[in-house]
Image (cartoon, rainbow, N blue to C red):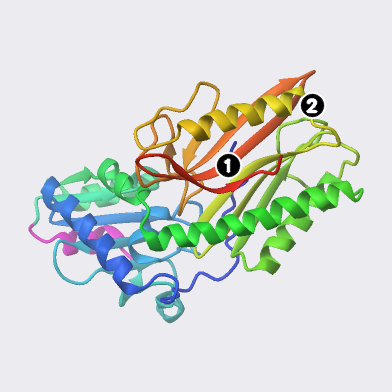
Amino acid sequence: MRVLETTLLTGPYDWDERALPRREYETRLERVRAAMTQAGAPALAIYGHPGNYSALAYLTNFVPKNGPALALVPREGPLRILASGTPKMMDAAKRLTWVEEVRPLGNAPKTVAEFLGDGAALGTWAFGALPQALYGGIAKALAPRVLLPLDEALDAARRRKSPCELELMRGAARFLAVASDAFAKSLRAGSGVRSAALAAERAAIAAGAQDARVMASLSAGGVPLPLDAASDERQLDPANAGIAVQNHGYWASGTVTVARHSGAAHAQARAALAAALAAAKGGAHLPDGIAANAIGLALEEGPGDRLELGAVYAVTSSATEGGANAYASALIAVGDKGCEVLWQGAA
């Protein structure tokens, strides 16, 4: 189940070398350049915008808070970032990344063409989200040179989490536990769903989360939905919530059910989740009816039809009884012989 996304980015995004050291990015850059070499791309352009910046952040830590941005990556030599904003805003933008050269986006097609030089092809990553006008401008400026999508290879590399990334996701999982516990405690104290959602967000932020987002059901056993100021229904039984929290750019998410009494649907959902966790390992297909998606710098980094070794997944099972939905979910890191459960919703 998708948790609410927003293009209003809050929380600290400056590069913290204690959490993500330079050597982490150097290793990632080696992987990216190996993919470029294999594809025959002398340069790579990575796109990001405030609503989707995971590819850009993976290599540069740069989060485009003010609008679209591009990272330009040569096969050898320093990287460059083109960021939305005026020249006076670039000093603040530089704090978001380890990349030393950060310039205004300006005439991006002209800059990209000059950066590619005599190269025959420009590798691209995340260009599927590029506005049509900007895409057309870059393609025209490069003609007859071609744009060469490298998403498949680079997305696969991004899904394989390093020990450093796993530790950050363990931290996110701890914040998720705090948030889900606060949601349940608030409901059981008599609060409405919106008040419980706010309590969950505040608890996660107070614990140290970078960001927290909660959706909740507006009817007993309903699917979690975005909440507004009027959505504070009380005495929903069961009440469902989709919760996502962020730690140094990395997300953890889960869907929880809070009920006064555990019914058959909740028991069925928990049993299905237990079977899925028992089967989870690299290369495995989860049982039918289980929803799974890779997660990390984005809430969704790819489908979980076949679990990839080294990836982290949000796994959810659901069941219905009398028109009411119940959920059970977990966050898992996939190994070759099983999985590490980073978080699991309370029974």
The circle drawn on residue 344 is: none
x and y percent of residue 97 in the render?
Answer: 38, 72
Dot 1: few (<14), some (14–19), or many (≥20) neighbours within 10 Å? many
Q: Quadrant of residue 68?
A: bottom left
The residues bearing labels 1 and 2 have C-alpha atoms spaced at a distance of 20 Å
* Magenta stretch contains residue 87: no
For this orientation, the residue located farthest to the top is: 322
Q: Quadrant of residue 22?
A: bottom left
Instruction: Give the secondary structure at mark 2.
Output: loop
Residue that numbered label 1 is attached to: 330
The circle drawn on residue 263 is: 2
Q: Quadrant of residue 268?
A: top right
x and y percent of residue 11 in the render?
Answer: 59, 68
Q: Which residue does the image show at 39% across and 67% down from the upper left?
A: 83
Dot 2: few (<14), some (14–19), or many (≥20) neighbours within 10 Å? few
**Residue 105 visible from this viewpoint:** no
Disc 2 marks which amino acid?
A: Gly
Upstream in sequence: badge 1 or badge 2:
2
Q: Nearer the viewer, residue 338 or 127?
A: 338
Q: Which residue does the image show at 65% across and 31% down from the upper left?
A: 270
Most common SS among magenta residues: helix
The reply to whether callout 1 and callout 2 are in contact (CB within 8 Å) is no
The range drawn in magenta is 106-118
Instruction: Give the secondary structure at mark 1.
Output: strand
> Where 172 sits versus 147, above or below?
below
